[in-house]
Amino acid sequence: MNRPEIDPDLIDEAVLALMHLTLHDDGSPTPIWRAWKSFDWSALARLHHKGLILDPVGKARSLILTEEGQRLSEEAFYRLFSSREPHLETGDDGGQEKAP
């Protein structure tokens, strides 16, 4: 079976999008955006090289996203993980399904 070539830029986009799940700021007037760094080290190195995160090497369990990294993280999160189809909900009409 021939496997397709893997695009590291797509992996980086997915990692950046998943960082949005654990993104938090430090509460300062100029927030520092942090995310857990439990991702593949090669992807983190590429994101650092692209200027989207600060150097992830160190003892801290989180990393710091740049302003651009934080913005792209949010954009990628919603682009990759937003529902493309409306979900059906059950209402008070006897269990009949209806679109939201």
Image: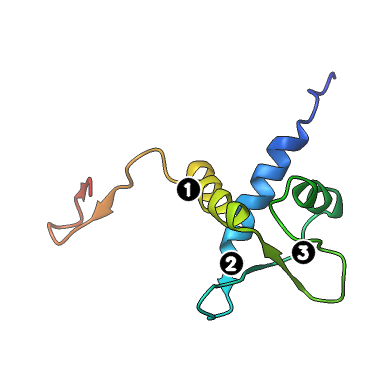
Quadrant (top left, top right, bottom left, bottom right) of the N terminus:
top right
Numbered circle sitting on residue 78: 1
Residue holding disc 2: 23
Label 1: which secondary element: helix
Q: Which residue is mark 3?
A: 38
The residue at the far top in this view is: 2
N-terminal of the pair, mark 2 or mark 3, is 2
- SS at badge 2: loop
Question: Does residue 63 lie above or below 43 as drawn?
Answer: below
Q: How far is the residue under mark 1 from the one under mark 2?
A: 14 Å
Residue located at (37% from left, 38% from top): 85
Q: Nearer the N terminus, badge 3 or badge 1?
A: 3
Tag 3: amino acid: Ser
Position of residue 65 relative to residue 79, above or below, is: below
* Picture coordinates of residue 68, whole percent (x, y): 59, 52
Q: Secondary structure at mark 3?
A: loop
The crowd level at tag 1 (other Cα within 10 Å; few <14, some 14-19, many 20+) is few
Crowding near the residue tagged with mark 2, few <14, some 14–19, many ≥20 C-alpha atoms within 10 Å: some
Provide residue 7's location: percent of width, then percent of height.
Answer: 76, 31
Q: Earlier in the sequence, mark 1 or mark 2?
A: 2
Under mark 1, the amino acid is Tyr
